[in-house]
Amino acid sequence: MNHMAVSRKAICVAVAVALCAGAAAQPGPDRWEPAIRAFEESDRSNPPDKGGIVFLGSSSFRRWDLDKFFPGKALVNRGFGGSQMADALRYLDRIVLPLEPRTLFLYEGDNDIASGKTPATVEREFREMVATVHAALPATRIVFVSVKPSIRRWHLIDVVRDANARVRAITQTSDLLEYIDVDSPLLGPHGEPRRDLFVEDELHLNDSGYAIWAELVAPHLD
C-alpha cells in the first residue's frame, strides 16, 4: 500500500471516529425513556396524591433531597438527568399532568444554554411550557427557579442572565407564574460563584447550596 493510500485510509478512519463522536454528543430524543418509565412504574405502585406540588427539571432537581429539606411536605420530584426544556415538555403528559399539581416548580435552561441554545429558545419553550400546562390545568401555579450561576459554566453567565431575564418578564404577566432568583444568593463578595456551595464537579450544589435554595423556595410552597 503506497503512502497516498495509507493517508486516504487514515482520513477515512478519522472521519468515521469524528462522526461517531458527533453521534454520541447528540443523543436521541428517547434517551430519557428509562427514567420516565421508572416514574410511571412508581406512580402505578405508589400513586402520589393529586393536587400536590411537583418539581420538574434537570439534575439540579434530581439530586435535591426534597424530603430532607422540606420534611412532611410530600413533594414529588420529577427531576431527570441532564434534561432540557424540550425534554420536560416532551414528557409533561406522562409524568406531570396526570398528577394534576396545584404548583409546578420548574428548573430548566441550564443544560439548554450549555448545549448552545439561545436565550430566545429558552424563552419560547418556557412560553410553550406555560401554555401546555395551563391548557390542561388552568389553575396550576408555575414557579420558575432561575438558571443558577456555577463555577463550571461561569463563562456562560451573560447568556444565562439574558435567558433568566426573558423568563422573568413572562412570569410578571400572570398571577399564576412566579420567579425565584437564585443568581445573587449563590455569589460571593467578588460577584463570582461561592466554591463552598458546590460539589467537586463545580456544577451541582452541595447541601449548603441546597439550603440556600430551600430558603428561597419555601415561601412559594403554599
Image (spheres, rainbow, N blue to C red):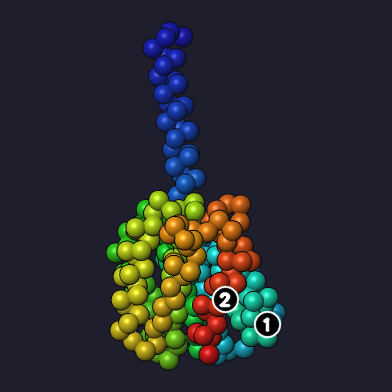
Q: Residue at x 44, y 38 (%)?
A: 19
Label 2 element class:
helix
Single out the mark in the foreground, 2 or 1. 2
Q: Nearer the viewer, residue 114 or 98?
A: 114
Q: Is residue 88 visible?
A: no
Circle 1 residue: 71
Rendered image: mark on residue 214: 2
Residue at point 39% right, 75% down? 129
Q: Residue at x 49, y 81 (%)?
A: 104
Q: Secondary structure at mark 1?
A: loop
| Few, some or many residues within 10 Å of mark 1 (<14, 14–19, 20+) | few
The x and y percentages for residue 206 are 62, 62
Camera-nearest residue between 8 and 190: 190
Q: Where residue 38 sits in the image (x, y, percent)?
A: 64, 69
> If you read the primary sequence from the N terminus, does the residue marked by circle 2 or circle 1 appear first?
1
Outermost residue on the top side: it is: 2
The image shows residue 97, relative to residue 160, as above or below, that is: below
**Label 2 to label 1, Cα distance in Å?**
11 Å
